[in-house]
Image (spheres, rainbow, N blue to C red):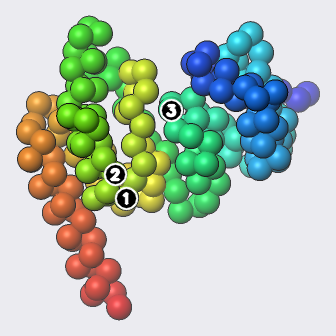
Amino acid sequence: MFFAQQILIPHKRAEILLGDNGAMLEYARKRLGCTIEIKDGNVVSISGDAYTEYNAHNVITAFGRGFDMATSLKLLSEDYFFASVSLKDLFNTKAGISRIKSRIIGEKGKTKLYIEEVSGAHVSIYGSFISFIGTIDETRMARAAVEVIINGGTHKKAYRIMEAMRRKLKESSMKNL
């Protein structure tokens, strides 16, 4: 018997996939090599062989968490990973979630931009999730900085930790040459 995977994504993200006469959805189908359908407004059904379903699940989940399709498709490379932090699991109120999201974004988006520049990871702040796409090291650096901020640390401390991780990576890669 054949079963399709189903993923629930936000309605707004499903609308983007379906927009422009479904051009993005068709593009995703071709790139991912499987059948992708949207039912009930936001239920994404994926069917194909195990490998293509796995890849499609990761890409559509990342897209649903706020990444654009081009960034989400980076997950097709074995060098890229997806990680996510649920703020709902950490904070009891919408005000708490909103406060942390604001701290991670920073004034005029500067904190998020700095985390992306230093780590090399892509960061998405969408709904109650902070998500990352990058190499394992990039994702670790970005996540470490975000976790400092989530735990009440200063931006300066978050930056120092991330910059120290980056220096260590550079030093270890220089030793391996």
Residue 82 horizontal/vertical position (percent)? 49, 45
Residue 28 horizontal/vertical position (percent)? 75, 41
Report if the CB atoms under discs 3 and 2 are less than 8 Å apart: no
Please determine whether, in this image, residue 5 is positioned above or below residue 121.
above
* Residue in the foreground of this view, choosing between 117 and 128: 117
Per the model, the C-alpha gap separating discs 3 and 2 is 15 Å
Q: Amino acid at mark 1?
A: Gly
Quadrant of res 165: bottom left
Per the model, the C-alpha gap separating discs 1 and 2 is 5 Å
The residue wearing badge 1 is 120
Q: Amino acid at mark 3?
A: Gly
**Numbered disc 3: secondary structure:** loop
Per the model, the C-alpha gap separating discs 1 and 3 is 18 Å
Please determine whether, in this image, residue 175 is positioned above or below residue 26.
below
Q: Most extreme residue toward the bottom, as rendered?
A: 177
**Numbered disc 2: secondary structure:** helix
Residue at coordinates 23% horizontally, 79% vertically from top-left?
171
Residue 96 horizontal/vertical position (percent)? 22, 15
Residue 32 horizontal/vertical position (percent)? 76, 47
The residue wearing badge 2 is 116
The residue wearing badge 3 is 66
Report if the CB atoms under discs 1 and 2 are less than 8 Å apart: yes
Would residue 97 be visible to someone looking at this image? yes
Would residue 58 be visible to someone looking at this image? no
